[in-house]
Image (cartoon, rainbow, N blue to C red):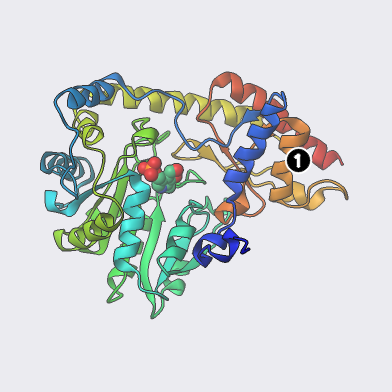
Amino acid sequence: MSTFALSSVLAKRASGMEEAPIMRMSRLAREQRAKGRDVVSFTLGEPDFDTPEPIRHAACTALEEGYTHYPPMPGFPEVRAAIAEKLRHENGLDVEPEGIVVSAGAKQALANTLFALIDPGDEIILPAPYWAAYLPIIELAGGVPVFIPTSAQDGFLPAAERIAEAIGERSKLLLLSSPCNPSGAVFPPALLEEIARLVQAHPRLMVLSDEIYEYILFDDARHVSIGALPGMFERTITVNGFSKGFAMTGWRLGYSASTPQLARAIAKMQGSFTAGVNAFAQRAILAALSDEARPAVEEMRQRYASRRALMLELLDGIEGLCLTPPAGTFYMLPDCSGLLADAAAGLPQDDMALAEWLLMEHGVATVPGSAFGAPGALRLSFATSEENIRKGCARLRQGLEALRGG
Ligand SMILES: Cc1ncc(COP(=O)(O)O)c(C=O)c1O
């Protein structure tokens, strides 16, 4: 009798994929809670707010109106037109509705784009820290990531010279996330201009600009779309979506914006995996982009701003902790390498061990920076209540101070 082993059947691309550290930490936190432990989680990468009412209402209406059939593959024409209008008006992009492809979240827009542009061996230049989920997509597309390390001391921004050094024969894409998950850094206009000059000096380099956190900005930070800089539109694919700014993670709505010619290639990739995006959900984009939803978006931003201030205040003054105030997003990335360097034997020596120890010993869940190419750091999400922030920061302080004391 033959025995069946799935492991002998699984493709290498599936069997070789390890559990991402963020998934591991969320799983460990869930397991601890299931055992009855009180755990505060700073791991969440999603707004804790409900989707604003006008948007929910629009989807219900669309359902009643019969938007239940296959939609056009790249999106409804009026939805593509509304997105193009938003990008023209707010971001200064010279984009046509035919350049928009509506996708199942920004993540699918990123995947579509990478599959449309990357041949095996092509290089993608990626400033670190980066969003961890870029790596498996790059790998599946056969691309090779070329990392540009940055540091907390530089505000987690890459110097233009480092980018210039990374550009080579096989470079095809420079992948930027601004505002950046996980560091919260926002690329200043002058740096984007320098980057634009570098890119245009290269015959086949393009920018993939992930702008999903564009509405979550603090103090005087300003979001600039690199595709709006002179000469950059045809060199840029702008990716955005509704998950973060509009609290719509579960709707799975995003888009890419590029030239109509590239959009056709991107749509072909999308069409190979999905037959377009949920029809009645797509209709809600029209409400999200209307004036009706804007007050709620601004209100959420203000709530993040006060939570950010609270978290910064509560973590201030921990000796050895380097805390860079994020200019955008709902994350911060304190660098703990000073503390880890001083930790006694038996206590955590790296960020992976530190995150696990903080969870098990102190009841606070974080994501190790190594997951994002920032070893020695911890990513903290402040998309959670002020009560959780107070409780979780007290635990963090206790843990981090004990680490040093050890
Ligand atoms: C930088 C970045 N880009 C893209 C996404 C994906 O967003 P979506 O929910 O639209 O797929 C995320 C989600 O965490 C993100 O952090």
Residue lying at 31% horizontally and 57% vertically, measured from the top left: 112
Q: Percent x, y for residue 99?
A: 17, 54
Question: Which SS class for mark 1?
Answer: helix
The furthest residue to the bottom: 169
Q: Quadrant of residue 235?
A: bottom left
Q: Quadrant of the C terminus?
A: top right
How far across and down, in percent of the image, does residue 327 sit? 45, 40
Label 1 is placed on what type of residue? Trp
Q: Which class describes the residues within 10 Å of circle 1: few (<14), some (14-19), or many (20+)?
A: some
Q: Which residue is mark 1?
A: 357
Observer-nearest of 126 and 58: 58
Tell me if residue 159 can be seen: no
- Quarter of the N terminus within the rendering: bottom right
Furthest residue to the front?
Answer: 1
Q: Position of residue 104 (x, y in %)?
A: 31, 44
Q: Nearer the viewer, residue 78 or 179?
A: 78
| 147 left or right of 37 in image | left
Q: Is residue 14 depicted above or below 401 in this figure?
A: below
Residue 50 lies, in percent from the top left, at 39, 23
Q: State ligand 1's quadrant.
A: top left
Q: Find residue 355 and report its image quarter.
A: top right
Relative to 53, residue 289 above or below: below
